Amino acid sequence: MEATKTASCLPFGIVFICIGILVNLIQATCFLIVRPLSKTLFRRINGAVAEILWLHIIWLMDWWSGIKVQLYTDDADTYRLMGKEHAILMPNHICDADILLVWLLAQRFDCLRSALMVVKKSSKYLPIYGWASWFFEFIFLDRSWEKDEQHLKSSLEGLKDFYRPFWLTMFVEGTRMTADKLLAAQEFAASRGLPVPKNVLVPRTKGFVAAVKHMRSFVPAVYDVTLAVPKGQGIPSLVRIFERQPSEDAMLEEFRAKGTFGGKLEIPDGGPSLKSLLVYITCLCLCCVGMYKFCQAFSLLSTWKGNAILAGGLAMVVAFGHIFIEYTKLPKRALIAAAAKANMN
């Protein structure tokens, strides 16, 4: 994404970074002081402050981009229990923005402050988001079973005493889908006599089997989630969200053909989150007042050095946003293939 497009969301970036740094500092302080005394109290505080940060993302999708969520289910009883029980979520993996979509779903069921995920290790090093996720008890994997087996086991068993119903999201495909990865998955499935997929990858089962094995005693549910976007709309990404563009296998084929999951109970969406709007407006006002007081205290607006410092700070915000967007973007080759596939459909 070009820097000019990143700069268009500068106010959001400033608020997100300021609040994110504050959240990280609170998390680090509580990790050092509170967690040794009470893990449950640490989790309660950590969940509350991390939710403030995640709600900024919810605001971005709900109020800025105008993403509409439509939920379909074939089990009304399961729907009534969502957010009220521990559960493992297994969504298909379109791109890294799927994490944001899972957060949006979790927020709808009042499960945002306990929406945990298994993600790739590299995301841990992203400023603010990665640090917040680490304190939030995301499970980071190298995607090498020899390295991950023991870490995954201990992390899963550590959730046994979690203080409230949680969702643990596992992208069992192991990687986001691209045209070349889909082709490889189809060749693999054909060679093993498995059903050949058209819209998803062949799942990697070791991590999921381990999760069920180690969490069977305290996690009663597994939610098989299929994420889909209407025909003609692009792959979800931060780029599309910032640009204000709303964005398993047989089910996806039907969705692309008819625009609905036939035979499923349609659950009406409650609409954009008022809580996220209130949190964002409050944080925006606090940041504006804080920045004004800071500039006034150090006379940053009245000297060329002060102006240079402010310009440098804004440039850092733009660079930070650019890093995040590039991290979530599909490779250019994959985007071309996805566009070609959409035109064929």
Image: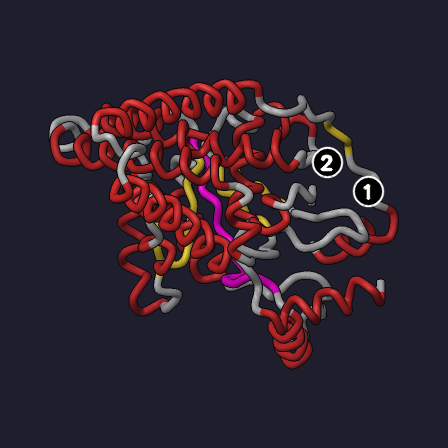
Q: Residue at x 28, y 56 (%)?
A: 151
Which dot marks residue 72?
Answer: 2
Q: Residue at x 33, y 31 (%)?
A: 162
Residue 234 or 173: which is nearer the viewer? 234
Residue 54: image location, x then y, percent:
44, 34
Q: Indicate whether 210 appears above or below 183.
A: above
Residue 123: image location, x then y, percent:
38, 55
**Residue 215 is drawn in which quadrant?**
top left
Most distant residue in the front direction: 303
Residue 53: image location, x then y, percent:
40, 33
Whether residue 163 is visible: no
- Residue 174 lies in the magenta stretch: yes
Number of numbered labels in the structure image: 2
Range drawn in magenta:
166-177
Distance between the Cα atoms at labels 1 and 2?
A: 9 Å
Q: Indicate whether 265 appears above or below 10.
A: above
The residue tagged 1 is: 260
